[in-house]
Every structure is written in structure tokens, then in C-alpha cells.
Amino acid sequence: AKMASGTDGNIISYDASGNPVAVATGNDGQVLTSAGAGAPPAFEASAANTPMWSAVPSSNQTLSNTTNTVLNFQTEVTDTNNAFASNKFTVPSGQAGQYFLTAAVRINDMTDGKEVQLSFKKNGGYEFSEGGTNRYLVSNSIQGANGSIYFNHQAIVTLAVGDYIQVATYQNSGSNKDVNYTYTRFSGFKLIT
């Protein structure tokens, strides 16, 4: 019948005994989250797709013939958790889970009918245990006519703390070819699950 004065921004709820309680005001940007039956809600940080990173090369890179070459990404576009360095993303502490990865590459002056591959490397190797078996996370393309080739690759992978991801490219044109840095990128983020 009577309500006492309270604190600006607090929300009235009820505890497990049915008594009124004040839910303390959260911080700017926080959201009200249920704590389940028998407990008042609480203000918490909103879920976000982080860690998140995006990086690009700062110059062309030479790809040797019939060699898997790790690509260089010297320029960070974004890196929410300071987890991208030395051309690789490393899963930071407390951030294990599923990640969406994407990479794109353009290779100059490819030869007609030759093969190009773009792949993700986990912890220095090419095998991922996804879908119950080891699978190579590789995108493959055959050059249809002499000229530059551009393609991209995406994957959803499960990563543990300390796992790291790199991008590698392979080509079998018969000679060295250049990655065109203005069309090449590597990015990703943790999925909210």
C-alpha cells in the first residue's frame, strides 16, 4: 500500500521469499538479465561477437610454385582483444568456443587451368576436428583463363584457449606469383552461443 523512496535507476523486484528488493542500477550499455527462478535479475554486460579481428597485408607477397605459403597481414583493421599478432589470431584466455573465420585473396597473373588453394591453418597444421572427422578447411579454384584470380573462404570452427589460426595459399602455375595486397584480408569473430 505504501512504497518507500528509492534510488534513481533501481528496479523493484522480489526475492525468493516474495519480499520486495531493489535491483541496483547497472552501468551504461549493460542489459537486464534473468538470474532464474528465485533470484532477482541483474544488470550485466551485453553479449557481443568478440573477440573480433580483421587484418590486411601492407604489400604484395610472393607465392612460390607448389608451396603452401602462410600469408602476411601486417596491418590490423580491428582487434578487440589484442589477440592478432605476427600474422595469426590466438584465442585469448576465457574465450574458447566457436569462431567464424573468413579470408580472401587475389593472385596476379595466374596461368590458364592451374590450381589455387586458400586454407586456414590451426596451430601450424591443416587438419581440424570438425563434424567428427579431420577435414582440411580449404577453398580450391581452377583458373579459367590467364589473368588474376580472386576468391574467398569461410568456416566455423571450435577453438580452445591458446589455439591460433593462420591463412595459407597454394598455387601450381609453374612459377612464382604475387598476392595482390589490396584485395587480400583475414578476419573473424567468436560466435554468441
Image (spheres, rainbow, N blue to C red):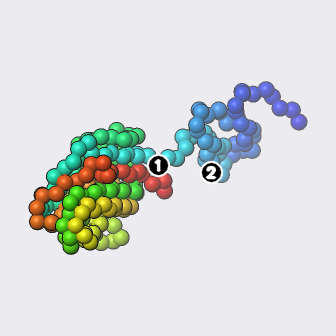
Amino acid at pointer 1: Asn
- Rendered image quadrant of residue 120: bottom left
Say if 31 sits above or below 9 in the image. Answer: below
Q: Is residue 192 above or below residue 77?
A: below
Report the residue at 20% width, 70% height from top: 112
Q: Are marks 1 and 2 in contact (CB under 8 Å)?
A: no
- The residue singled out by tag 2 in the image is 36
**Residue 15 position in % (x across, y down):** 69, 42
Within 10 Å of disc 2 (Cα), the crowding (few <14, some 14-19, many 20+) is few
107 sits left or right of 193 in the view? left
Residue that label 1 marks:
49
Query: Residue 98's spot in the image, x, y percent?
Result: 40, 57
Image check: 133 left or right of 23? left
Which residue occupies the foreground of this view, 161 or 55?
A: 55
Q: Amino acid at mark 2?
A: Gly
Residue at image coords 15%, 66%: 173
Residue 179 visible, this orientation = yes
Viewer can see residue 121: no
Say what secondary structure mark 2 lies in.
loop
Please give the label number shown on residue 88.
Answer: none
Q: Name the residue: 21% across, 48% down.
A: 60
Q: Where residue 33 sits in the image (x, y, percent)?
A: 61, 45
